[in-house]
Image (cartoon, helix red, strand yellow):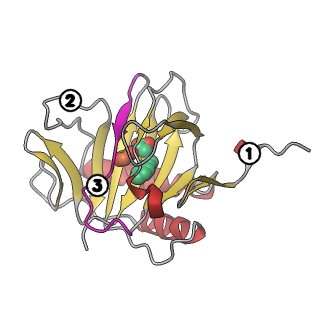
Amino acid sequence: MIPDLFAEPRAAMAPGAVLLRGFALPRETALRAAIDTVTAEAPFRHMTTPGGFTMSVAMTTCGEVGWVTDRKGYRYSPVDPLSGKPWPAMPAPFRALATEAAAAAGYPGFHPDSCLINRYTPGTRLSLHQDQDEKDFSQPIVSVSLGLPATFQFGGPRRTDPTVKFPLSHGDVAVWGGPSRLFFHGVATLKDGAHPLLGRKRINLTFRRALE
Ligand code: MD3
Ligand code: FE
């Protein structure tokens, strides 16, 4: 029998990176409600890169601190620059999912203090980058894909390393730790389509431990 690698519920993507296919599916209703609660208080916005480009992906945050970018640079901020108020608290279903997924991938004791919520519409992409604004790179990152499918591009420790493509679908959870924590990655231009639950968009939740 030929094994279908893409059908495996748990697959290694790179050293320290684990894909948990469908892990978030039993919680989709609670996650969607929590996203609506957060975005009612801290709406999605298109931030500006230090180089002056407007990001095509719209973002918001919940938790103690949120990743922000403007002409001054990338950083974590305890307040939402749009409102001047603290970011919304991290909803309990978010926190539980992140901690349980990290443990299932071999990273027990992960307690995120930030969740970046990315919203992609067809035509939107996220170019190759590293996540390096957090204090402790021994902490993993947990990402949850919801809505339209996307092609995730996963490289290596150098920008010029070759990339491999992984399809990410509604309910998939990926955990990035160990050597892969600082690997370059991105998301290819989102194809058009409509998801039964979320419509013409993809939402990605990225859980991080940003502070010590
Ligand atoms: C691999 N988000 O927000 S999640 C990001 O689908 C980001 O919205 C993408 O990259 C998205 O920074 C990809 C997957 C991901 C997140 C962090 C990583 C992969 C990672 C950190 C290190 C290596
Ligand atoms: Fe990233």
Mark number for residue 54? 2
Q: Where is mark 3, residue-wise?
A: 132
Marks 1 and 2, how far apart at CA: 37 Å
In which quadrant is the C terminus drawn? bottom left
Name the foreground residue: 40 vs 63: 63
What amino acid is found at the position of numbered circle 1 in the picture? Leu
Q: Are marks 3 and 2 in contact (CB under 8 Å)?
A: no
Closer to the N terminus: mark 1 or mark 3?
Answer: 1
Marks 1 and 3, how far apart at CA: 30 Å
SS for dot 2:
loop
Q: Is mark 2 within 8 Å of ligand 1?
A: no
Closer to the N terminus: mark 3 or mark 2?
Answer: 2
SS for dot 3:
loop
Q: Is residue 131 left or right of residue 198?
A: left
Q: Residue at x 23, y 38 (%)?
A: 45
Q: Where is mark 1, residue-wise?
A: 5
SS for dot 1:
helix
What amino acid is found at the position of numbered circle 2 in the picture? Thr
x%, y% of residue 108?
Answer: 51, 76
